[in-house]
Amino acid sequence: MTIGLEMGGAEPLRPFIELARPEHPSLVDETHRLDALFGVTNIPQNIWIDETGTIVRPPEPGSPAPVYVETDDPTYTMVMHYMHERRDDPGAYSERIRDWARKGADSGYALTPAEVVAGSRPRSVDVSRAAAHFDLALHLWRTEGFSERTLRHLEQAHTLQPDNITYRRQAYSAWSRGDRSDPAAFFMQTPKPGEEADWPFVSDFGKDMAALGINV
């Protein structure tokens, strides 16, 4: 199944799900529970869970080969570059999943429970505090919109868990939506030309990727 992290609910994601026409369930995580329960820190990330409910691989980057479409969204272009630069063969990850689906625990890509535990990290106090600030930001966003208080709690979540890109990208999208009538603005994660002065964050998706050494 695919799960979208989107505190705006299902409607912002519906056009993309319908365009993809998936044959598997597509769910929406409005509260970023995947962050808290599994340690998801960015999208796309994959978690392999077998038919017994056992985690076979904890969250990790992995996506099919990107398919380009014509768009004026600079964030889309950045993401496509990011996906290509991080992977020599973007389609290889899909083949790993197919190998696991065929062979189960005998797949060379399936980890043992001990390996999964060893590759997992305990949740630090700062990560827990970051989650609390994000929850407060979510509540305020729903009750009073993208207010100064909403922004302050999102900034605290960023500061306390800087490697959680889902918090950042959700904040960018929430602010970009604002009162605009353009549905695509919901997912703008970098300021449009001429709107740089209005961007309330010290960073944006492009700067985040540059900080990771990704040329976008």
Image: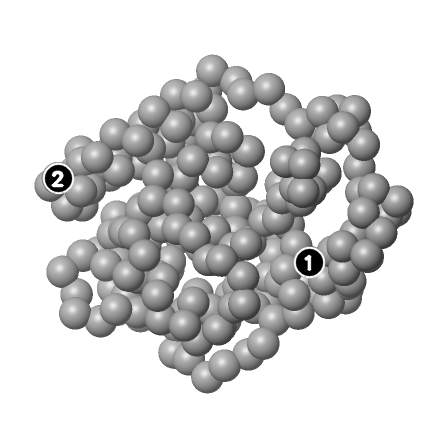
- What amino acid is labelled 2 in the image? Thr
State the residue at coordinates (46%, 58%).
Answer: 26
Q: Residues within 10 Å of mark 1 (few under 14, many from 20)?
A: few
**Residue 49 at what x, y percent from top left?**
65, 41
Eye-nearest disc, 1 or 2: 2
Picture layout, residue 87 above or below residue 158: below
**Left or right: 189 with respect to 113?**
left
Comparing 215 with 59, the one in front is 59
Comparing 215 with 110, the one in front is 110
The quadrant in which the N terminus is found is bottom right
Q: Which residue is mark 2?
A: 143
**Left or right: 106 with respect to 155?**
right
The quadrant in which the C terminus is found is bottom right
Picture layout, residue 129 above or below residue 81: above
Q: Report, in whole angstroms, how far the alpha carbon at label 1 lies from the one at label 2.
A: 39 Å
Q: Does dot 2 land on a helix, a strand or a loop?
A: helix
Looking at the image, can residue 203 be seen? no
Taking the view exactly as shown, the residue that stands out farthest to the front is 52
Taking the view exactly as shown, the residue that stands out farthest to the bottom is 70
State the residue at coordinates (37%, 58%).
Answer: 189
- What amino acid is labelled 1 in the image? Arg
Which numbered disc, 1 or 2, marks the residue that appears first in the sequence?
1
Q: Does dot 1 land on a helix, a strand or a loop?
A: loop
State the residue at coordinates (39%, 51%).
Answer: 28
Q: Which mark is residue 53?
A: none
Q: How is the image coloured?
A: one colour
Looking at the image, can residue 54 be seen? yes
Q: Which residue is mark 1?
A: 86
